[in-house]
Image: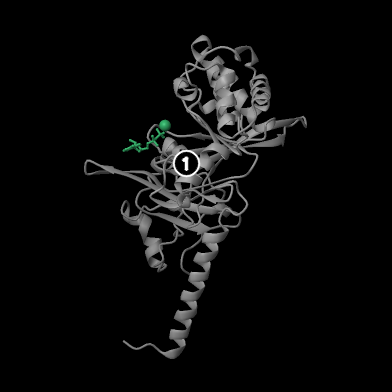
Amino acid sequence: MTMPAASKVAAASGIAELGAEALRARTSYGEGALVVCDRVVRIYSGDGIEVQALQGLDLLIDEGELVAMIGASGSGKSTLINILAGLDTPTAGRVEVAGQDLGALSARERLAYRRQQVGFVWQQTSRNLLPYLTARQNVTMPLRFSGVSARKRDKRAMELLATLGVAHCANRTPSRMSGGEQQRAAIATALANAPRLLLADEPTGELDSHTAQDVFRALQTANTELGATVLVVTHDPAVSTQVRRTVAIRDGRTSSETLQHEVADVLGHIVQQAVEYAVLDRAGRVQLPREMTEQHRMRDRVRLRSLEDHIGVWPDRSGESPSANTVGARSGNAAGGPSGNPADRPANSPSGNAPEEGGK
Ligand code: ADP
Ligand code: MG
């Protein structure tokens, strides 16, 4: 097959442009963020069954943020935390923390990363602290590995325990501490080496709500007073009212984010308002919440139109009622855009927002 010279040139420059675009996307996505998850995939395989725990997950966290992560059981939260903790590696995609590519670390670098850059707190209180050591000894242990002098270790441990409200537990072993106290001592231990990132996987999952509050406050203290960037997995939806940013994960991808905004109420008082956003990925994909797609009986395909200040999404009714389809067909709307049929207009939409006559 031959191609006219001009179109050959056009095709070549098109490909060059695509290449440049891909390179830009690869190098610039997440520049300056402390945590970069770029299309992260994690597939578990075994017994002939493949589980796609993470399916191209994108997430950026800036230094200094405290981010809550919510999601149904099995949505991939622990898989992500384990990867960020340097305990597991992604099957595909890029994970960077503080400029380090976690997929490219040698065994030695990985160990240094886990000791210096990241701290973690797990749900099971027993997994966080050594049972035969006191709280103070637990906190000094990571400092000992880092070669900090005995005097400095002790000072640091006592400061951390005091800041997190568990100085009174310094000389107790975990069995003589409550669950909440154990988790706060665990946070102190995780922060011993002043990591830049603190990861907590359902740290309040085994606690009653009152104790959970104390532990959550300790995480906030770690963020505001001790300067750690915090990512905390929780199944308590109430946390989104207490943090500025909550990321929801669904089927191995970030699906929505709730941000707290400060707005003025009618009396001029500044109040917090939570606004939920859908995540728009770099390929332009948005996950429509199932409640909404079911309510509007959207399936397989939807119609889109760019309106003055937003994009409208309409269900495809082509297969349902012959009359609903005639206007679109008559106007030769080959692209499948919204037709001019009033039956297709969202009922509660102002007329200015309704889809216009398709294909003029
Ligand atoms: P979450 O923490 O959100 O509950 P996980 O990250 O633990 O979810 O799990 C995500 C999915 O991956 C689940 O379907 C789970 O069964 C599967 N999974 C997790 N760990 C493993 C593993 N080691 N081997 C096989 N499948 C796993
Ligand atoms: Mg989990």
Taking the image as shown, residue 66 lies to the left or right of residue 302, namely right
Q: Which residue is drawn at 63% across and 32% down?
A: 148
**Which residue extends farthest right?**
268
Q: What element carries label 1?
A: loop
Taking the image as shown, residue 91 lies to the left or right of residue 38, namely left
- Nearest to the observer: residue 154 or residue 271: 154
Q: Is residue 178 above or below residue 58?
A: above
Residue 350 percent location from the top left of the image: 57, 48
- In this picture the colour scheme is one colour
Residue 63 percent location from the top left of the image: 64, 43
- Nearest to the observer: residue 297 or residue 343: 297
- Badge 1: few (under 14), some or many (20 or more) residues near its Cα, within 10 Å? many
Q: Name the residue under label 1.
A: 86
Taking the image as shown, residue 348 lies to the left or right of residue 300, namely right
Taking the image as shown, residue 220 lies to the left or right of residue 357, namely right
Q: Residue at x 45, y 46 (%)?
A: 107
Q: In this view, does 83 lie above or below 176?
A: below
- Nearest to the observer: residue 263 or residue 57: 57
